[in-house]
Amino acid sequence: MIIDKPYAIGVDVGGTNTVFGIVDKRGQIIKSGSIKTGKHAEIKDFIDELSGALDTLINQVGTKDEIKGIGVGAPNGNFFTGSIEFAPNLRWKGVIPFVEMMEERIGIPVALTNDANAAAIGEMTYGAAIGMKDFIVVTLGTGVGSGIVVNGKLVYGHDGFAGELGHVIMRRSNGRLCGCGRTGCLEAYSSATGLARTAREYLDMRPNENSKLRTMPIEDITSKDVFDAALDGDEMAKEVFQFTGEILGEAFADFVAFSSPEAIILFGGLANAGDLIMKPIRESMEKNLLNIYKNKIKLLFSELKESDAAVLGASALGWEVK
């Protein structure tokens, strides 16, 4: 029997893709893979595909006896209950007993947390937040997630759901419908899908304005298309990033007021836009901060490869699982 097990597994369940990796004790991802999150209508079929892919990966490095545990980061993942509960950006609705289903299928102990919390753990252990005790990670992907660390500990709240900053209401009058069913949420404006939605609105409201974005079907426009157009100097595309960054900056100024973080760290697809998104965020945040916080808060990009923070953070749960 192997006492000192050399590996843990981290799984990041995103709205579009599920990425996973086998991680050693030095924090190196030695094997990795991915599957499409929304491929299966039934959660059982997704669990079967994920477990099968993990089995294949495990067989490449050894046996299941060498895996300490599996940590999973998922939208609305509840650390306390082991369930994914009412995740708006996932195909499967209601309360899903994810840990129970995974353990039954794969035969390895599993722990679950919110995907953004997993990213925060990864950033604190391996990335831009090394040495920090107070910071916020904001994930800008299919949705907007957040992991809040105060005094070196993740904030879970009494029920496991603290830190849903993507669902802070930013527009209380005539706000956009969000996937959560409410209107005006930050996520509806500042996720990758929200940014693409802004571009489509601009094209519709300003029919006489030239833009490279008009060369493609309006319903097919993605955040990547807007980014590419902005890099080519397209004025409308640059305005879309300006609008998105301004809303994020407003939100960040409010986030600072309740936890006074040393830094806010951006992670996920939109973070790849660099100064296109960071410059308007910084200007808007400083404009809206209370004076006591001005010029104190670092705005940083994740120092880890795309998806590595979430996988590494989730794997940290795998080391701790009983």
Image: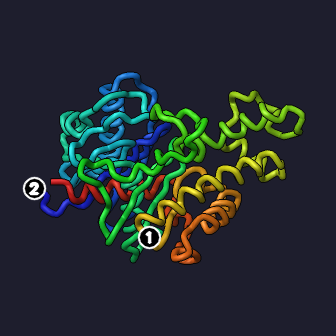
The mark nearer the N terminus, 1 or 2, is 2
> Is residue 63 in view from this perspective?
no
**Image quadrant in which you'd find residue 68:** bottom left
In this rendered view, identify the residue nearer to me: 98 or 138. Answer: 138
Residue type marked 1: Ser
**Image quadrant in which you'd find residue 251:** bottom right
- Please name the residue shown 52% across and 66% down the image: 303
Q: Which residue is mark 2?
A: 1
In this rendered view, identify the residue nearer to me: 180 or 16. Answer: 180
Residue lying furthest top:
41
> Is residue 25 in view from this perspective?
yes
Q: Position of residue 212 (x, y in %)?
A: 83, 40
Give the number of the disc on residue 241: none
Residue type marked 2: Met
Q: Which residue is mark 1?
A: 260
For mark 1, give the secondary structure. Answer: loop
Q: Nearer the viewer, mark 1 or mark 2?
A: 1
- Please name the residue shown 85% across and 40% down the image: 211
